[in-house]
Image (spheres, helix red, strand yellow):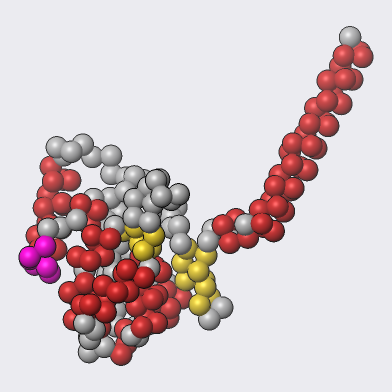
Amino acid sequence: MKKNLITAVLMTIVTTILLGIIYPLVVTALAQVLFHDKANGQLISRDGKVIGSRIIGQPFTGPGYFHSRPSAAGTNGYDATSSAGTNYAATNQKLLDRVKGDVDTLHSENPSTPVPIDMVTTSASGLDPDITPASAYFQVPRIAKTRGLSEEQVRSLIAAHGYGRDLGLLGEPRLNVLELNLALDARVPNNATNNKSSHNTDLTSRLAAGQ
């Protein structure tokens, strides 16, 4: 009995040290060496300041930027501490009213093009960092007008920053909204356009200020 107790205690100590301390430290060290960017949240920095993450979405409302899809994470959406969807049924009146309102608003912006579904629906996490190519192309007229670019220039930017299916099979073609907007600012700074709204500031400065 005593021998079994000692064996059990020693086994507990050994496995705790091995699996609770050594193993996590080794995995963490390997991740930092082999996958440093991914292990640290795929953060994007400009001028020494972190302005976002490639894998956590954030809202963009300025007319000179590509807009993310709607979000139900937190009170105002895109709250990384409250990842969630609405869990509304497809027949829920609040959902129907919200989608109809969004569709009407988007149609006023681009009346000749069908509204892509991801521009009026939220993701399950509420933190989707990507939009479909259809969503990006839908926003071309507004962005081109605000930035003083031709629509073809904006389309070329979209084509240059798209991601295809992983391994050619998994997922769907997509564009990262933050990367796309940074590319826009690199092409034509938003404060160089004729738009004088409160959103008419360089994206890096705006995000660094927490706006």
Q: What residue is drawn where x is 23% and y is 60%?
A: 134
Q: Is residue 90 left or right of residue 46?
A: left
Query: Within the image, what quadrant is residue 159 found in?
Result: bottom left
Q: Is residue 22 left or right of residue 92?
A: right
Relative to the observer, which residue lies in front, 172 or 54?
Answer: 172
Residue 103 visible in the displayed image: yes
Q: What residue is drawn where x is 83% and y is 32%?
A: 14
Which x, y percent locates residue 138?
A: 19, 65
Relative to the observer, which residue lies in front, 92 or 149?
Answer: 149
Q: Is residue 44 above or below residue 145?
A: above
Residue 67 colored in magenta in the image: no
In the image, which residues are magenta?
108-113
Which x, y percent locates residue 122?
A: 28, 50
Query: Within the image, what quadrant is residue 146 found in?
Result: bottom left
Q: Quadrant of the C terminus?
A: bottom left
Relative to the observer, which residue lies in front, 23 or 172?
Answer: 172
Residue with the most extreme front position: 168
Residue with the most extreme top position: 1
Which x, y percent locates residue 94?
A: 16, 45
Q: Quadrant of the N terminus?
A: top right
Q: What residue is drawn where x is 17% and y is 74%?
A: 141
Q: How many marks?
A: 0
Q: Is residue 199 above or below residue 5?
A: below
Q: Is residue 115 above or below residue 4?
A: below
What secondary structure do most residues of the magenta stretch adopt? Answer: loop
Which x, y percent locates residue 8?
A: 83, 20
Q: Is residue 202 left or right of residue 155?
A: right
Q: What residue is drawn where x is 39% and y is 46%?
A: 169
Residue 130 visible in the displayed image: no
Query: Within the image, what quadrant is residue 202 found in?
Result: bottom left
